[in-house]
Image (cartoon, rainbow, N blue to C red):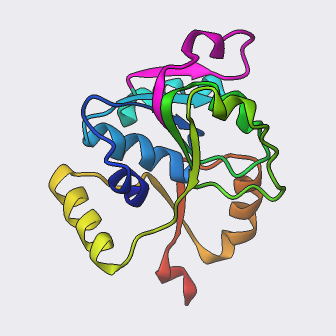
Amino acid sequence: MYSPIRHWGIGKGHKVAVLGLGGLGHMAVKLAAAFGAEVTLLSSSPSKKADAARLGAHDFIVTSEKGALDKVKNRFDFILDTVSAPHDLAVYAGLLKTDGVMIIVGLPDQPAKLPASPLIGRRRSIAGSMIGGIAETQEMLDFCAEKGIVSDIETIAIQDIDKAYDRMLKGDVRYRFVIDLKSLT
């Protein structure tokens, strides 16, 4: 999440939406807020509102509520799309301001459809990003150490890997699983 935030210069004065609050999304909220952006979390799950605020989000929108997204059309400079399930990119592209950028970091298992109309009227862009190189990774580690930013994790034993995988498929993770290496013996 650090790489796209740095590449696009996201920070103070920007309105950023983070789409999805999972392993990537929770770090997107923390990092974008730490860089000074005004962060809105977009989630289909109302139960994640308290977590979004705790992580640094300034606003929370339940995307599954009828009409909720109408209130934020043309609002965001950037959308960090962390969702790895199929979803309608056109709906979210409509939330971008003129010259806004949706940065895709999630990997859905199906190709996305995107008509041109939500993009061409306001010069909106869709981009993708992955992790940076070694120098940027070191920069990220230094920044996170300075700001006290860490991933929210749940430690599991290797023997529970199948249960963890099932929970991950159900979206029942807050927000990363980490295997306790002591359980390997």
Query: Magenta stretch containing residue 38, yes or no?
Result: no
Count of marks overlaid on the render: 0
Between residue 140 and residue 171, name the one nearer to us: 140
At 54% from the left and 53% from the top, the residue drawn is 23
Q: Indicate the position of residue 137 as horizontal and vertical percent values.
A: 32, 71
Position of residue 183 relative to residue 35, above or below, is below
At 49% from the left and 34% from the top, the residue drawn is 100
Image position of 46 (left or right of 39): right
Between residue 73 and residue 139, name the one nearer to us: 73
Position of residue 162 relative to residue 27, above or below, is below
Image position of 15 (left or right of 120): left
Position of residue 131 relative to residue 24, above or below, is below
Quadrant hosting residue 133: bottom left
Q: Indicate the position of residue 7 as horizontal and vertical percent values.
A: 36, 56
Between residue 171 and residue 38, name the one nearer to us: 38
Quadrant hosting residue 43: top right
At 63% from the left and 22% from the top, the residue drawn is 46
Q: Indicate the position of residue 98 as horizontal and vertical percent values.
A: 50, 27
Position of residue 79 relative to residue 153, above or below, is above
The answer to whether one can see residue 175 in this image is: no
The answer to whether one can see residue 69 in this image is: yes
Direction bottom: furthest residue? 185
Dividing the image into 4 quarters, which one contains the N terminus?
bottom left
Question: What residue range appears in magenta?
Answer: 58-78
Dividing the image into 4 quarters, which one contains the C terminus?
bottom right
Direction left: furthest residue? 146
Q: Indicate the position of residue 82 as horizontal and vertical percent values.
A: 59, 48
